[in-house]
Amino acid sequence: MKTNFLRLRELLRNEFPGEWSEISGDNYPAPEWTNAAATVISLLQMLVILVVMTGDAVWNYIPGFRSGPPEFYYKMKENPALTFMIVFLVIPSYVQSFANTGAFEIFLDDKLIFSKLETGRMPNVGEIMAAMEKAGLQRGS
């Protein structure tokens, strides 16, 4: 996406010279819950590593598990490859898919000119030029 922005910025500077004091771009912020989910996943992964390294004894130190490991722990031990794939590959990838918004939005003086989030697609050059002219910018000669 950064490449798309840099190309667009250069195109706008060339097509509308003298109209810009600044053209800036930034990443669209990910939803807040994705940061919390990433923290929980990291803690879960550290717990899995701790359990693998220490074995069944670690459950004696976790509050609420004084009577021994929970049932899911034994299921995880029976399927270590599946457990590894789910904890270290599937769950983080799933959460990351929500963090990547794929947003590409163009604002002119705080007015939305184009939004990939609304249209579901990237704009073409003609659409951007027409929107800029419609907003009152004059093309250079």
Image (cartoon, rainbow, N blue to C red):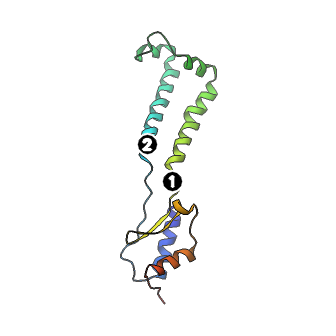
In the image, residue 18 sits, relative to residue 116, either above or below, namely below
> Which residue sits at x=38%, y=68%?
110
Kindly identify which residue carries mark 1. Answer: 101
- Residue placed furthest toward the top: 67
In the image, residue 46 sits, relative to residue 128, either above or below, namely above
- Figure label count: 2
Kindly identify which residue carries mark 2. Answer: 33
> Which residue sits at x=48%, y=34%?
41
> Tag on residue 23?
none
Q: Position of residue 13 (x, y in %)?
A: 45, 78
| Element at label 1 | loop
In the image, residue 113 sits, relative to residue 48, either above or below, namely below
- Sooner in the amino-acid sequence: mark 2 or mark 1: 2
| Element at label 2 | helix
Q: Are circles 2 and 1 on residues that touch, CB within 8 Å?
A: no
Q: Where is residue 114 in the image (x, y as percent from the top left)?
A: 50, 68
> Which residue sits at x=55%, y=75%?
127
> Which residue sits at x=42%, y=61%?
26
Q: Distance between the residues labelled 2 and 1?
A: 13 Å
Q: Position of residue 45 (x, y in %)?
A: 49, 31
**Viewer-side residue, 96 vs 48:** 96
Q: Say which amino acid is labelled 2.
A: Trp
Few, some or many residues within 10 Å of mark 1 (<14, 14–19, 20+): some
In the image, residue 84 sits, relative to residue 132, either above or below, namely above
Q: Where is residue 76 in the image (x, y as percent from the top left)?
A: 59, 22
Few, some or many residues within 10 Å of mark 2 (<14, 14–19, 20+): few
- Residue placed furthest toward the left: 21
**Viewer-side residue, 118 vs 57:** 118
Q: Say which amino acid is labelled 1.
A: Thr
